[in-house]
Amino acid sequence: MSKVWLITGASRGIGAEVAKAALDAGDSVIATGRNVGAVAAAFSGWAKMLPVAVDVTMPEQVANGVKAGLEHFGRIDVLVNNAGYALFGAAEECSAGEFEMAFRTNVLGLAEVTRAVLPTFRAQRSGHVFNLSSTAGFQGFPGASAYCASKFAVEGYSESLAAELNPLGIHVTIVEPGYVRTGFLSSNSAAYAEKVIADYDPTAGAVRRSVQAMDGRQTSDPKKLAQAILVLADATEPPLRFTAGADALERLEHSLILKRRDLDRWRELSLSLAHD
């Protein structure tokens, strides 16, 4: 049976590749983005595709976009929460406004879209939510505190969501890509804290330079990631987490080693907290 996908941030990058892969597979796609013209241009000539203007930070647009998709296709089977961006800068460098906007998009916007789609999934007693996280969702990096905080929040939200939805026949999968060769790190996509503090140059500054140098040289292929997401969407028992790419696997394994080290080192102190 063919599926109907709703994909946020679908005009380019991972979102666009997932949309194209779904369309190639014969599925239908509600492709959303802030600039509906850019979305329509990205899928010019494709049948079974509905471009919809949705800024995930605008609840009314989210509600209208989901309504338009349902009126057009009659159902939604897969939600891909892909819209988001990276904010780079040391914690002290990021202003309250910059930090808040990152959360409004990466966390609150994701939750807004999910809330809008869940009544349909519950009524169907089926559906699959894919929430795009990152290696930054399980490991902190200097110079990316706001981005990491937002993706850690996505992970916690998604774990809880999965526990709530699983009894209703609805799946949740957190996708944790490493570096994927899209425009995500380009100057018109990634954001940088306006304030720069010299003391953080060896840490946050080094990460800023590394990220800029990585643009266009990322190791993972977005088309292959899109195909992997289609495989997961067809799985009878999809995973809660999909760690995507060799670099992501390496980072996760290293993170688990560090967590185990601290757990073992301080185990006795932790156990000593019980009431006598």
Image (spheres, rainbow, N blue to C red):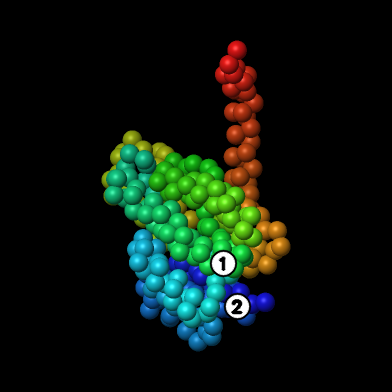
Q: Mark 2 points at which residue?
A: 27
Residue at the image position 44 percent from the left and 41 percent from the top: 142
- Residue at point 34% right, 63% down? 58
**Which residue does the numbered mark 1 point to in the structure image?**
123
As drawn, the residue found furthest toward the right would be: 236
Which label belongs to residue 188?
Answer: none
Quadrant in which the N terminus is drawn? bottom right
Which numbered disc, 1 or 2, marks the residue that appears first in the sequence?
2
Residue 247 visible in rendering:
no
Question: How far apart in space, not on screen, are marks 1 and 2 (Cα)?
Answer: 21 Å
Give the camera-side residue of 31 and 113.
113
Identify the amino acid type marked 1. Ala
Q: In this view, does 243 lie to the left or right of 67?
A: right
Mark closer to the observer (1, 2): 1
Q: Is residue 23 visible?
A: yes
Asked where in the image residue 270 lies, by quadrant, the reply is: top right
The x, y position of residue 87, in whole percent, is: 39, 51
Callout 2: 10 Å neighbours few (<14), some, many (20+)? some
Quarter of the C terminus within the rendering: top right
What percent of the width, then of the height, locates residue 128?
59, 63
Residue lying at the far top in this picture: please name it: 276
Count of numbered marks: 2
Q: Would you identify the image quadrant in which residue 265 lies?
A: top right
Q: Which amino acid does label 2 sit on?
A: Asp
Residue 254 to residue 69: above or below? above
Classify mark 2: helix, strand or loop. Answer: loop
Identify the residue at image location x=53%, y=85%: 47
| Residue 236 % position (x, y) | 71, 62
Q: Residues within 10 Å of mark 1 (few under 14, many from 20)?
A: few
**Residue 255: percent from left, percent from top:** 59, 40
